């Protein structure tokens, strides 16, 4: 009898410890808790027009081990800035055309109305979706692309996305959150079929659940309240060909050692090049944005 009581106590203890460890496990998905840590005073008085934030930006894109680079990127810095990265779907036709259409038309339509708002960002992405569908119908082909887009004014950012091109947000050189992929493997994680750590290795990792160009109505994930940037904040936008080979803790450690956007990107690219097998890796693209305060 005492033996069974002893075994039962051990089992209960194991369950309690397991539950505790699961709760302590760091989740990097953006949610209300992670965003609330960013919705705070950033050193700008709303009546102080002399202090601004500068968005120092660098980018890289590579064909990797493929014949065609289906990734596209574009950014423009100004009173209202934007950054956009798209990854055309290789499983369909003309992924490079889809991603190219998305970034070029994003710039054109943004320049015609560069309002800094969630509604405008969602409207832009919806317009891009229709353009890709119309061109695909004209050519009697199917094509699609992911998209992650960021807008910024003098002290805040907004973002919206479809697919698995991620946005990573760092404060004090620590990762605060990254976007949650629209993919089958992410659903596996959500239902407990696989662990988050297995996303990068799962054979279904390239099956996406939301993209531009497939449905007539695209459901964009976005944030309704702008994030107030702070001096030293860092943003990384990258396609899956990039983040698949660079772990989150490595992004942080390399950020500690590199205080310029170009150097940080280069250090992460070196990791990718060390890890690819026989140059058969996917295209990879990334934009790094370093936020710094300045006065007029």
Image (cartoon, rainbow, N blue to C red):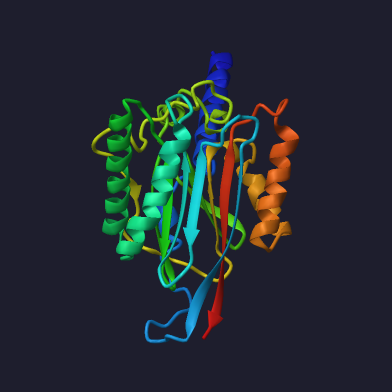
Relative placement, left or right, of 255 versus 100 is right
Give the camera-side residue of 32 and 284. 284
| Residue at the image point whose x is 39% and y is 33% from the top | 144
Res 95 quadrant in image: top left
Relative placement, left or right, of 83 versus 212 is right
Relative placement, left or right, of 264 versus 116 is right
Res 200 quadrant in image: top right
Residue 82, relative to residue 65: is it above or below?
Answer: below
| Residue at the image point whose x is 58% and y is 26% from the top | 201
| Residue at the image point whose x is 59% and y is 67% from the top | 232
Q: Is residue 191 visible?
A: yes
Q: In this figure, what is the number of numbered marks?
A: 0
Residue 271 rendering spot, x and y as whole percentages: 72, 41
Give the camera-side residue of 41 and 142. 142
Give the camera-side residue of 172 and 69. 69
Q: Is residue 32 visible?
A: no
Residue 89, relative to residue 247: is it above or below?
Answer: above
Res 187 quadrant in image: top left
Residue 176 rendering spot, x and y as whole percentages: 52, 54
Relative placement, left or right, of 160 versus 264 is left
Residue 62 rendering spot, x and y as whole percentages: 62, 41
Give the camera-side residue of 83 and 29. 83
Residue 161 rendering spot, x and y as whole percentages: 39, 46
Q: Looking at the image, which residue sits at the far left?
A: 217
Image quarter of the N terminus? top right
């Amino acid at each position: 009898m005492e033996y069974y009581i002893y075994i039962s106590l051990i089992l209960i203890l194991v369950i309690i410890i397991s539950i505790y460890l699961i709760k302590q496990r760091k989740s990097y998905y953006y949610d209300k808790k992670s965003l609330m840590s960013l919705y705070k005073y950033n050193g700008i008085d709303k009546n102080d027009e002399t202090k601004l934030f500068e968005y120092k930006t660098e980018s890289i894109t590579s064909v990797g081990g493929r014949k065609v680079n289906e990734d596209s990127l574009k950014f423009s810095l100004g009173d209202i800035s934007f950054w956009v990265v798209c990854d055309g779907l290789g499983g369909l036709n003309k992924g490079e055309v889809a991603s190219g259409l998305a970034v070029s038309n994003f710039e054109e339509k943004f320049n015609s109305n560069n309002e800094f708002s969630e509604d405008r960002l969602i409207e832009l992405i919806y317009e891009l979706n229709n353009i890709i569908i119309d061109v695909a119908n004209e050519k009697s082909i199917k094509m699609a692309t992911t998209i992650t887009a960021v807008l910024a004014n003098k002290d805040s950012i907004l973002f919206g996305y479809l697919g698995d091109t991620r946005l990573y947000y760092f404060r004090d050189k620590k990762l605060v959150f990254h976007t949650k992929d629209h993919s089958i493997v992410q659903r596996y994680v959500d239902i407990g079929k696989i662990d988050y750590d297995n996303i990068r290795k799962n054979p279904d990792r390239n099956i996406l659940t939301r993209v531009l160009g497939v449905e007539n109505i695209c459901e964009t994930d976005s944030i309704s309240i702008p994030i107030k940037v702070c001096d030293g904040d860092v943003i990384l936008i990258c396609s899956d060909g990039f983040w698949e080979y660079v772990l989150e803790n490595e992004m942080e450690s390399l950020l500690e050692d590199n205080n310029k956007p170009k150097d940080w990107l280069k250090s992460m690219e070196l990791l990718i090049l060390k890890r690819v097998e026989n140059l058969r890796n996917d295209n990879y693209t990334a934009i790094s944005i370093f936020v710094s305060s300045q006065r007029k």
